[in-house]
Amino acid sequence: MYNEVDLDKIDINSEPPMEEPARQYYFMAKCREWIREFERKNGRCPTAFTQTFGCQMNARDSEKLTGILEKIGYKQAESEEADFVIYNTCTVRENANNKVWGRLGYLNAYKKQHPHMKIALCGCMMQEPEVIEKLRKSYRFVDLVFGTHNIYKFAELLAEALEQEGMFIDVWKGTDQIVEDLPIERKYAFKSGVNIMFGCNNFCSYCIVPYVRGRERSRKPQDILREIERLAADGVVEIMLLGQNVNSYGKTLEEPMTFAQLLSEVEKLEGIERIRFMTSHPKDLSDELIEVMANSNKICNHLHLPLQSGSSRILKKMNRRYDKEQYLALAAKIRKAMPGLALTTDIIVGFPGETEEDFEETMDVVRQVGYDSAFTFIYSKRTGTPAAAMEEQVPEAVVKERFDRLLKEVQRGAAERARALTGSVEKVLAEEINEQDEALVTGRMGNNFIVHFPGTEDLIGKIVNVKLKECRGFYFYGEMTD
Ligand code: SAH
Ligand code: SF4
Ligand code: F3S
């Protein structure tokens, strides 16, 4: 198994191999040499810090970065006060970018006092040419910059950055390659994300993801299943299958397979007790998927079904390829097939041209569907997307006022649905000791609600029965029962 490759057995004086992932293991061995030299000089291990700014896919990528850093001998640091810092960036909304620029200012000051440190940037934001321009001009203290398509080459890029001084930039426009079997260091011992596809072909008119993540590519089912088997053998009980639009999984494979078929295969794997997935695009959600979900013992009773807007006119401008009625019909069909299912969503407020009537349509869907939770976003203009060029951008004050109204309605509905669960007994995966109160364990139910209950560390990673005693809006207090 590649994760157990012994770097010391690799001859780093020979030419690097051309094939992947062997090539990356060769460069890991090279970096390992550099680390040993650092240890000899400084009498300590170098430290590394990885920060994720984006979605679950971004977080999974960070686990790959950390896996490689650990493999070559870096010790994980808890903060940016480290010998190597890497920011895995997001650019889905402007405030994601602003966070990175802000933190870079701080890092610059820290590096002035610690000139030996290395700073790397990767992820979605690096795929934007304006960002690279700005870095080249005003952020010369950054050592390494790469994008989403060549993240599998991290070891090779790092070897380069460790050897040389000055800024090294390598950003690709796209790739059709998927490299398997590189090291991964999981954040949690008992749960894990699993990529099933990369990229997106939908081009929703507001969204930058297809431009920075490239075209949709599915991993082969054998590779996915093998990874999940290994995770199960390593103690993982819950997995989350990741893709921008999981419902179109498998369309580009040599032997096409549907997402529902993939789920049925995953269900058969021993040791995995819970299956989640993100994200489902309403336009591609099939009856086959509803049936597989309804009959499954392992798929969680939770579905994230982004609405974006309740107005058919706006949905058309968004290029979402469903209308209000189709969405409502789909939600009703799902609720009928799985009455206990929690439905959650994403909503954008203030898309160009959104009128008060359009917004009321969104409020109407929120009231009719009754979401268990919703992420609400203020529309953020992304350069290069069709929506950025649309006229009638909505004034900020109007957007803010609508956003507040929406949030109130979402919270009211969610609290009402949560309250109805009070008194029931739910299966809960214990995830961590409560941050505020050490006598409590925090866990997650299948429907994704959080519950705090008295317990000890040995419960972490186990699925237990918890009686929900008290509802506090979005979370519960409970007690373990048999
Ligand atoms: N692939 C997923 C979404 C990924 S991005 C899907 O289609 O559902 C996560 C969420 O960010 C989106 O659902 C959308 O609500 C929000 N989002 C994307 N682009 C945005 C923008 N330009 N402004 C505000 N929110 C945006
Ligand atoms: Fe963006 Fe739409 Fe693709 Fe989701 S489906 S990532 S919102 S383009
Ligand atoms: Fe952000 Fe990239 Fe995810 S833009 S939301 S990190 S795919």
Image: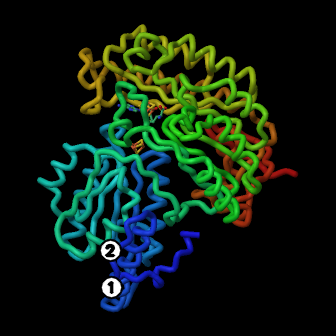
**Nearest to N terminus: mark 2 or mark 1:** 1
Whether residue 363 sits left or right of residue 206 in the image: it is right
In the rendered image, the quadrant that contains the N terminus is bottom right
Residue at position x 50%, y 47% from top?
A: 56
- Which residue bears the numbered disc 2? 83
Q: Mark 1 belongs to which amino acid? A: Phe
Q: In this view, does 8 lie to the left or right of 144?
A: right
Q: Position of residue 11 (x, y in %)?
A: 40, 83
Tell me the mark number nearer the camera, choosing from 2 and 1. Answer: 1
Q: Which residue is drawn at 35% across and 24% down?
A: 205
What's the distance in space between the residues labelled 2 and 1, CA to CA? Answer: 11 Å
Closer to the camera in the image, 277 or 433: 277
The amino acid pointed to by label 2 is Asp
Q: Do the numbered discs 2 and 1 sit on residues whose CB atoms are within 8 Å?
A: yes
* Residue lying at the far right of the rendered structure: 482
Q: Closer to the camera, 289 or 275?
A: 289
- Asked which quadrant contains residue 385, the reply is top left
Q: Does the residue labelled 1 lie within 8 Å of ligand 3?
A: no
Residue ID for mark 1: 38
Residue at the spot 70% in from the left edge and 31% down from the top edge: 341
Q: What is the secondary structure assignment of the residue under circle 2?
A: loop
Secondary element at tag 1 = helix
Mark 2 neighbour density, 10 Å: few (under 14) some (14–19) many (20 or more): many
Image coordinates of residue 243 in percent, x first then y, are 51, 41
Q: Residue furthest left?
A: 137
Above or below for 241 versus 168:
above
* Quarter of the displayed picture in which ligand 3 can be seen: top left
The quarter of the displayed image where residue 250 is located: top right
The percent position of residue 94, horizontal first and vertical second, equals 30, 38
Rendered image: mark on residue 11: none
Q: Residues within 10 Å of mark 1 (few under 14, many from 20)?
A: some
